[in-house]
Amino acid sequence: MSEALNDDGVPPAAEPKSNLRFLIPLAIFIVLAGFLYRGLFLNPREVPSPFIGKPAPQFSLAQLAQPDQSFAPQQMQGQVWLLNVWASWCVACRQEHPLLVELARRKAVPIVGLNYKDKPDAAKGWLAQWGDPYDLSVKDLDGRVGIEFGVYGVPETFLIDKNGVIRFKQIGPITEEVWTTKMLPMIEELRRS
Amino acid sequence: MKRLLALLMLALPLAVLAADATPTDLDPVSAKRAVDISAQLRCLVCQNQSIAESSAELAVDLRRQVNEQIKAGKSDREIVDFMVDRYGDFVLYKPPFNMTTLLLWLGPLALGVLAVVAFVRTLRARNRAIVARPLTDAERVEAERLLSQVSKEQR
């Protein structure tokens, strides 16, 4: 190859320092393909919450069962608890509901429901039909408290520690796996501290 | 008549566009601000639309928040910060410049610089490789023969 070029009187361009130079594009391709492959398995719906490690927003809302009584997160001070955002119109809530009912039956952790943008009658009917795992539910009729918590999809669940700090957020239904591998160990640790 | 109709038809999409995200009870300046702010914010439910474009319920609620905060006299910055505090940097279509987004912001620039450096280096190496060398006598004769052949052919 270089001989042929010399015959034309034009010396070849600088000799490659190494014969492996032609592998550079391949290497770049492999790295890029690696990134893209990884991207296939990321869930764009899971937006990292800016709340982890921050105090839960304060609110005071009327309770679903007893509208004349209100609930505020301070009332849970000293306990590790879950704030579960749910609605009767939410299909995925049905999916996680049996697990919540089971957790309530085992008294695993206090669960407060934030009934998000729901009609109280529909919500009560839903609980009557599928069981009520909540210590109490509060009515967020216009979704304002939901916005305070950065809720964008229902169900969402916040794990809040004794000092009212959010430690974990589950977006979408809590699964058996998430509960046993992440939430339960975390709750036990937070209770000890 | 036909032309007028055609013109009106052309104007139709504009009317449709204007109907997007019309804030209800704001003065025109505030309304413009509301749309501008909403256009910077990503709708979390339908991630490829801004909350100005989206008709998802969450987007409607967030637009209401924006309108209320404008009425309460908050600055654009404060309203955007309010959203970031709750939904994270992800709500911003234009990601902020920080450690995690360093590569995102500077990556293209770095690649560009790299390309220019590689280009210049290649050119220089090629220039160095071309060595001026006087022709040997045999080569000169051959060159002249070829040249005269060409000029004959042209005639």
Image (spheres, rainbow, N blue to C red):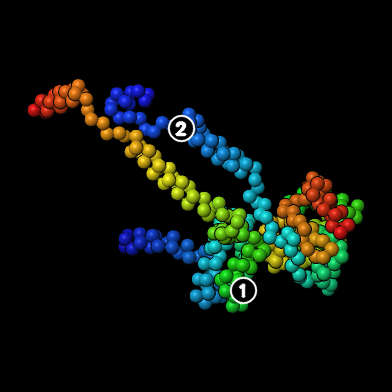
Say which residue label 2 marks.
Answer: A17
Give the residue drawn at x 59%, y 67%: B80
Which kind of residue does numbered mark 1 sit on? Glu
| Whole-percent x, y for residue A111 in the image | 84, 59
Q: Is residue A130 visible?
A: no
- For label 2, count other residues whose C-alpha is less than 10 Å away and answer few (under 14), some (14-19) or many (20+): few
| Chain letter behind tag 1 | B
Instruction: Classify mark 1: helix, strand or loop.
Output: helix
Check residue B68 in the rendering and tell me which mark sits there, or answer none. Answer: 1
* Residue B82 location, quadrant: bottom right
Front position in the image: B3 or B35: B35
Give the residue drawn at x 61%, y 43%: A39
For the C terminus of chain A, give its image quadrant: bottom right
Give the residue drawn at x 44%, y 32%: A16
Cβ–Cβ under 8 Å for marks 1 and 2: no
Front position in the image: A155 or B108: B108
Which kind of residue does numbered mark 2 sit on? Lys
Inter-mark Cα distance, 1 to 2: 66 Å
| Whole-percent x, y for residue A56 in the image | 76, 65
For the N terminus of chain A, give its image quadrant: top left
